[in-house]
Each structure stands twice: as structure tokens, then as C-alpha cells.
Amino acid sequence: KTGSIALEDIDSLAKTAYPLCMRQLHSALREDHHLKHGGRQQYGLFLKGIGLTMEQALKFWRTEFSKKMDGDKFEKQYAYNIRHSFGKEGKRVNYTPYSCMKIIMGTQPGPGDYHGCPFRHTDVKLLKQRLASYKIPAQGIEQIADLVKGYHYQLACTKYFELTHNIDKDEVSGLSLQHPNQYFDASMDIQS
Ligand code: SF4
């Protein structure tokens, strides 16, 4: 599937096919024209997982970052890391996108950080507000909040999937969400 996603489609995919963690990273990037290290890692590898080529990834990050910094600085400070994550620099390890478990158990986001799992790391009150702004019905928001309070983060995410794809529980029960890229692929399957 590498190369099957067009960069122009990413904004709309972020709304329709991204799990909440990646939607949060994408909108922070678009708003701030920057993401801190933890966010770049989590989102960058996810983008690689949905099929961006290295050239597309470089273009994607350069376009956004250069709204706030000059192109030279981007090349010096960030381009290397992007190539590195595609296994083209340094030890040439081909890094894999983070699983839900890795994100959930990973470093707690600090101020100005957007990485992490919103079901795990966002204050429940704020999470509920955000879900409401995404037009999730009130009853669904309560169901998600209950799952979060019971520490069932991936089930909360599955519920979010169900509500944003207008399908019922039986259809997603086979999902058993373990990975943000699995979420994306399942969404694309439904939408296609
Ligand atoms: Fe992302 Fe996984 Fe959390 Fe869903 S459960 S928001 S896919 S980390």
C-alpha cells in the first residue's frame, strides 16, 4: 500500500479514518506548524504505516514546519530523523509504528506535547469536551468516559470507532484494537 495515500487527502482522512491519538497530533501540527519529538515519532511512524513514502513524508513535514522556520533549519534539524525512521540513515533500522500498548504505557505527555493516547492521557473532562466538539452523541460520550474510568482505553477507542463510523457493536467486535494503524485500515475497509 506504500504510495497509495495522496498528501492532499490527509486532512480529511484525519477526520474520518484516524484514531483520536493521531487526529490530535495532526491538528496540533496544522495549528502550531510544529510537533515536539514524542509527537513527531508517534505520528511520523503512523504516517509511514498508512503508506506514505519517504519522499511524501519529507514533503509533508517540510511543508508544515517551513511555515515557521526556514527550509535550511528543517533540513539540518529534522530531515535526517525522518530519513532515519525510514531506515535510510544511521543504523538503517526500519522502525515500526507504535502499538496502542506502547503509546499507552509510554512517557506521559508534558505541556506542549500531543503524543500519547487521549483515552489514557487526557483529563476526562477535556476529553468529553473534545468528543462533543467532534459531534459524538452525549450518550456515546458517557459510554466512552465510563470505559476510560475503568482503564479500558482500547475499548474506549473501539467505541469511538463505532460511533464515528455509524456501525454497531457486533460489526466491530472482531476489531480487538491493538494498533493505531489497525484502526486506520479497518476504517478504510469500511469506507471503501
Ligand atoms: Fe490511539 Fe490506540 Fe489510544 Fe486508540 S487506543 S487513541 S489507537 S493509542
Image (tube, rainbow, N blue to C red):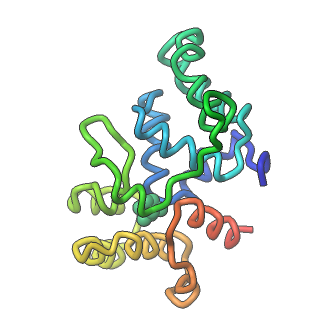
Count of numbered circles on the image: 0
Camera-nearest residue between 178 and 65 = 178
Q: Is residue 15 above or below residue 42?
A: below
- Residue occupying the point 47% across, 35% down: 29
Quadrant where the C terminus is found in the figure: bottom right
Q: Is residue 168 above or below residue 57?
A: below
Q: Is residue 13 above or below residue 162?
A: above
Camera-nearest residue between 37 and 148 = 37
**Left or right: residue 71 compared with residue 109:** right
- Residue occupying the point 73% across, 31% down: 55
**Farthest front residue in view:** 91
**Left or right: residue 31 compared with residue 111:** right
Which quadrant would residue 85 be assigned to in this image?
Answer: top right
Which quadrant would residue 81 be assigned to in this image?
Answer: top right
Which quadrant would residue 136 be assigned to in this image?
Answer: bottom left
x and y percentages locating residue 104 in the rendered image? 36, 59
Quarter of the render that holds ligand 1? bottom left
x and y percentages locating residue 179 in the rendered image? 52, 64
- Residue occupying the point 33% across, 62% down: 119
x and y percentages locating residue 45 in the rendered image? 57, 45
Camera-nearest residue between 81 and 123 = 81
- Residue occupying the point 59% across, 23% down: 80
Quadrant where the N terminus is found in the figure: bottom right
x and y percentages locating residue 72 in the rendered image? 58, 9
